[in-house]
Image (cartoon, rainbow, N blue to C red):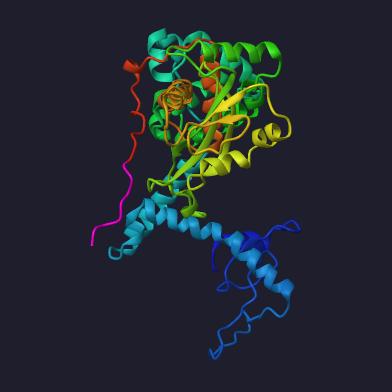
Amino acid sequence: MESGLRQLFERHHVPVGCHLLGDSGYPCKTWLLTPYFNPQPGAQLKYNMMTPFIMPATAREMFYNRKHTETRGVIERTFGILKMRFRCLDKSGGTLQYSILCGMLCFTQHFHESRYRPQHYAERPNLLEHYSNDELYARYRFGRDDIAFICNILRPHLECATLRSHALTVEEQVLIALHFYASGSFFEVIGDGLAVRMSAVGHVVHSVSSALTNLLGQFVKWPENEDDMARTKRKFFSLVGGGVPNTIGVIDCTHVHIQAPHAREWDYVNRKGRHSINVQLVGNADLVVTNCVVRWPGSVHDARILRASHLFQRFQQNTPDGILLGDSGYPLLPWLMTPFATVANDSQQRYNSVHATTRGTIERLNGVIKCRFASKACHIICACIVLHNIAQTRRVPLQEALIDGPPPCAEVPDLLPPQL
């Protein structure tokens, strides 16, 4: 250590508590701390009077060694960055003067590059002014006024206190989430349109989905008063082709396909051999969701989801003033009507026909949600249900010709065992 640094620290007074860290190859000084040395079993040690070997004998000394190594690792990472950035430092050959000169130049350039540089942010476009109303419908499934309405209801949950670090506005967060819901595209592709990083897009989608899920009770409501109940029955009965009287809702389950999860992957495989979440929906004649259950894996049967729902417990205790319509996968209950499995006369045939006409509402509802939003997972499904009810209430058109995202998932044929 015949260097100017040693002379500087030994000739001048060093404040108490200030020191350098070095490995066991350096002598232990008042201003240079080295770790306790722990030799390998059976190794031959050469003792040096100047740098004696000190072995950790207590847990405190071992803790010191661990913290010493974590702190001193900074210089190891610095060496790695230098040798990775300047390959001439990692090559053998050349004269000693050439190597020293290259090292000095590289260290100087590394010092200048490591200095603080101000962060430059890309200017983000105002997409609400850039796109027309039809283009907004095509890309985000909502028009300008509808997006403003969504921003207003989510502003208390999403608005940042300051614009520090070029924070995203509520409008930009909502547009990012709507683009993902509508297209189901990659985060990186969505972020390119707004000059936003992929990690920021993922954070925004999670935040907006959680905020919309918290509003589920506000926009997904069962008709409580008699006027709403009578209006629902009247609309079901006035369906084209005739509807079942006294109907207050139609119930069905739909599978939303997902990627194979890491935990209990087999539970999510449905009868068609694909991983999915089985979502139970109850809707009215206006294609508005009035009740939903979004938490069951794809292998669970529709009737099992119904029996475990709060709606089932509520209707079993207090029979409602009306009936629900379900397919043959549901049990026949005083408040749940299913079609005849086998038709024996004309009356049963007419009942099945009217039942199918009325229950087709829930099939159209499932199709509209999947066509309008292509995203998946439980929180995101709940967010899409809330947005769907907002769209139905505000009469947002579903322009299928302008949809630029992937088409709705087609039905997959049943997987039959191979023929032997």
Quadrant in the picture for the N terminus: bottom right
Residue 414 on the magenta span:
yes
Residue 168 is situated, as x and y percent measured from the top left of the image, at 55, 24
Residue 194 on the magenta span:
no
Residue 397 is situated, as x and y percent measured from the top left of the image, at 43, 12
Q: Quadrant of residue 135?
A: top left
Quadrant in the picture for the C terminus: bottom left
Q: Is residue 395 above or below residue 366?
A: above
The residue sitting at 42% across, 32% down in the picture is 344
Task: Tally the numbered discs.
Answer: 0
- Extent of the magenta region: 413-420
Residue 390 is situated, as x and y percent measured from the top left of the image, at 55, 17
The residue sitting at 34% across, 29% down in the picture is 406
Does the rendering let one see residue 122? no
Q: Quick one: 88 or 8, which is closer to the camera?
A: 88
Q: Quadrant of residue 161?
A: top right
Q: Is residue 125 above or below residue 62?
A: above
Q: Quick one: 8 or 55, which is closer to the camera?
A: 55
